Amino acid sequence: MKKIIIFLLSCVMCLGFTGLGQVLAAENPTICAVHPFTGRFAFAGIHGADGMKDAIDMFNEKGGINGEKIEYHWEDGKYKNDVGIAAFKRLYAKHKPQAMYGQSTGMTKGLAPEIKNRYKVLYSSYSFAEMAARPEENPYLFIAGPTYSEMFNVLLKYIAEKDPGANIAFFYSDTEFGREPIPDGRRICKELGLNLVAEEVSKVGGVDVTTQVLDLKRNNAEYCIFQGFVTSPITTVMKQAKDYGLDCQFMGTFWSTEKHLLDQLGPMADEYIGVTAYSYYYQDEVPMIKKIRKWNQENHPDKADYRSQAYMQNFMAGLLFIRALENAYEMGGFTPENLVKGFQSIKNYDVGGLMPPVTVENNSIPVGRVVRGNSETGQFDPISDWIRLE
């Protein structure tokens, strides 16, 4: 009798495991997101949420994955870590997604251990923090573009080729966002033979930057890279530098290379350089931008005049989630292991010029392009080709 029971249990277990594989393969693919619809970063969340939804909707319109449309659910994280983390946990409990998107560096760092050990969902966010591009430590985390450190690398390589041995300054906010790439920036300056002569720190939105500007002049900074800001105090720094006779090329990373900064700079827009990860909405010669513009005219006519780089970032993340889900399905099902393999196996993925053909390396895409502001058009013009980092 005992042997019969053991045999029957073994059969049930075998059937159970077979059935589980079938359920995983046929299960509705689901993506959830926490966007900052309100709070200090709402300008990004409003566009970003549409970008991800549009990428998913465009894909679903073609039939989804083996006939199954991807579900998409989101909540507002208000750009507060505790609110965002609570929203993540609610979404997971309710929808059991295979992929999730977060609103910030702080939220990502706070959730990373639980994503690795408990939730095991493919995860990306608005942040380009390097900790999300360390697959050996955080296998489920990825960045839909270059890390902040890789952006610094692109700008510093551009400077080193143009002006070897130049004097460099970093100007960053006293936040995780601001401090994130600074240690790597110091290392890259040394490797490229550039002189890091000053590091200036300011509060986000700080208005009194006289001390920092005078320090830049005292140290004869020839290039200054901003990190951890969107607009303020960049405009104030540049205006005061001009008043004090400082001849310095000001530059910025992704979140400070956006149209609203050029609008604030006005005639000084020509004097600002940045690095971006994606083509801009006004680059309508790019095939994917053409599709995005047409989709927005048909589905978001009230927002079709302009879409920010936050939209492009989320659209790109949506494409990568989708490709990882497709690859995982082909591998036998949407298991955490298959999702990681499905993402990491992305090679030469043609995204229609939104970026160059995408190859994932260490869970990021180490590619960027240097652009310069144009005061006449209020746009950024490319001044380099796409720069791939080794």
Image (tube, rainbow, N blue to C red):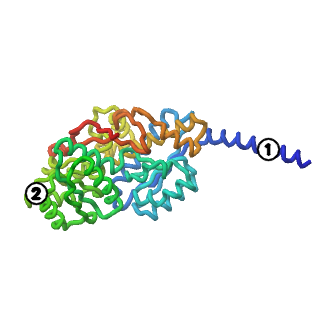
Percent of width and height locating residue 37: 39, 56
In this image, 307 relative to 214: left or right? right
Task: Determine the residue positioned at 62% across, 42% down.
Answer: 24
In this image, 154 relative to 51: left or right? left
The residue carrying mark 2 is 246
* The one of 20 and 153 positioned closer to us in this rendering: 153
The reply to whether residue 362 is in sight is yes
Q: CA distance from mark 1 to mark 2?
A: 78 Å
The reply to whether residue 379 is in sight is no
Task: Determine the residue positioned at 56% across, 55% down.
Answer: 117
* Amino acid tagged 2: Leu
Q: Relative to 217, say whether 390 is above or below.
A: above
**Secondary structure found at label 1:** helix
* Amino acid tagged 1: Ser
Percent of width and height locating residue 191: 27, 48
Q: Which mark is residue 327?
A: none
Percent of width and height locating residue 5: 86, 47
* The one of 306 and 228 positioned closer to us in this rendering: 228
* The one of 141 and 389 positioned closer to us in this rendering: 389
Circle 2 packing at 10 Å, graded few (<14), some (14-19), many (20+), is some
Q: Quadrant of the C terminus?
A: top left
**Secondary structure found at label 2:** loop
Residues at circles 1 and 2 in contact by the CB criterion of under 8 Å: no
The residue carrying mark 1 is 10
Percent of width and height locating residue 294: 35, 35
